[in-house]
Amino acid sequence: MLAGIGGWQGGARAEAVDVAAAKREGKVVWYTSAPIEQAQKLAKLFEGETGIKVELFRSGGTAVLRRFLQEKEGGRVAADVLSTADPAASASLARKGMFVAFKPSNFEKVAHTAKDADGYYVAYRLNMVTFFVRTDKVAAADVPKAWSDLVDPKYRGKMILTDPSFTSLQVSVVGTLARLKGWTYYDGLRRNEIMVVQGNQQVTDMLKRGERLIAAGALDSYAVDARREGHPIANIFPADGTFAVPGPSGVAAGAPNPNAAKLFAEFLIGDTAQKFIVADGAYSPRVDLPPPEGSPPLGEIKLLPVDYEQIEKEAPMIKRKFNEVFH
């Protein structure tokens, strides 16, 4: 259960990577649900450091997992490294023997709640789920401050959110809020004529165009990117609890490029990648690094606990109930 982010994992010893063997393999295949521009930049940074080519498959978290599992069921492993925003799914895959245990350099610097203690997966970023608000169109007095505010009729027709059937990050959010507030909470959002779209990019695009003014929980780094483009879109950390969902990466068992896979997994939590992650506007899972510029330290944010084991068990039900409410 994620009760907070912090603390060191003691007794972790980094495992050496055979760099020469990784370079002989010459490529690594990365399946990820990271924002596309961030994934592409990380791939280029790795290629620049190592000379090893990154073949990237990027889609929504559910689509990435589906492809990985379909390939596995078909008797082949195409991905070397799998990164999603679904800790419950990563834990399930680890239990089924689909990841290799590996503790890369800097493993001990990653918060214990953002990794598997045995190294079967480790987060390379924290996915902070915040409200997005068009500050030029929503008066300061009307900005929602808590999840409970969103059912207020004054927000009717102004909100948008992502679909857990496409965006795996949203499974944890919807499942947790439904447990805390009941499914009647989502009935209230439906009555407020909230729009449902597949992913965070669509949410952000709708706010950029002014077609919706409030995102009812979306990945914070998208709003950061929008502000850099000049859009007046603010992140609001809900006062009744913000989600900090780790984005785990695992080295696939049977990976076609096993050494390059380990080198890439090590790169993802190394200094180059992590400093880029923070500069790009996302929170690092490493406890020795600061928050993104302009964002509060994790210690100042009230975090909502997520029971990932329960989320994993209930994921099909969560997606079905959400679909019943909104469709």
Image (cartoon, rainbow, N blue to C red):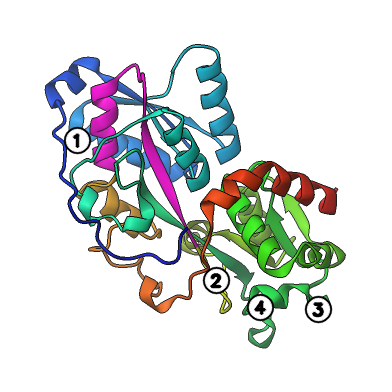
Residue 47 showing in the rendered view: no
Nearest the eye: 158 or 85: 85
**Cα separation between marks 1 and 2:** 34 Å
The answer to whether the residues at label 2 and label 4 have Cβ atoms under 8 Å apart is: no
Q: Residue at x 28, y 34 (%)?
A: 264
Mark before the other along the chain sequence, 3 or 1:
1
102 relative to 153 in the view: left or right = left
The answer to whether the residues at label 1 and label 2 have Cβ atoms under 8 Å apart is: no
* Tag 3: amino acid: Lys
Q: Which mark is residue 234?
A: 2
Q: Which mark is residue 49?
A: 1
Q: Is mark 3 on a helix, strand or loop?
A: helix
Residue 262 painted magenta: yes
Mark before the other along the chain sequence, 4 or 1:
1
Residue 227 painted magenta: no
The answer to whether the residues at label 3 and label 1 have Cβ atoms under 8 Å apart is: no
* Tag 1: amino acid: Glu
19 relative to 75 in the view: left or right = left
* Tag 4: amino acid: Pro
The residue carrying pointer 4 sits among few (fewer than 14), some (14 to 19) or many (20 or more) residues within 10 Å by Cα, namely many
Q: Which mark is residue 144?
A: 4
Mark before the other along the chain sequence, 1 or 2:
1
Q: Which mark is residue 154?
A: 3
Residue range in magenta is 244-268
The residue carrying pointer 3 sits among few (fewer than 14), some (14 to 19) or many (20 or more) residues within 10 Å by Cα, namely few
The answer to whether the residues at label 3 and label 4 have Cβ atoms under 8 Å apart is: no
**Cα separation between marks 3 and 4:** 10 Å
* Tag 2: amino acid: Ala
Q: What element carries label 2?
A: strand
Find residue 308 and report its horizontal and vertical position in percent. Answer: 52, 52
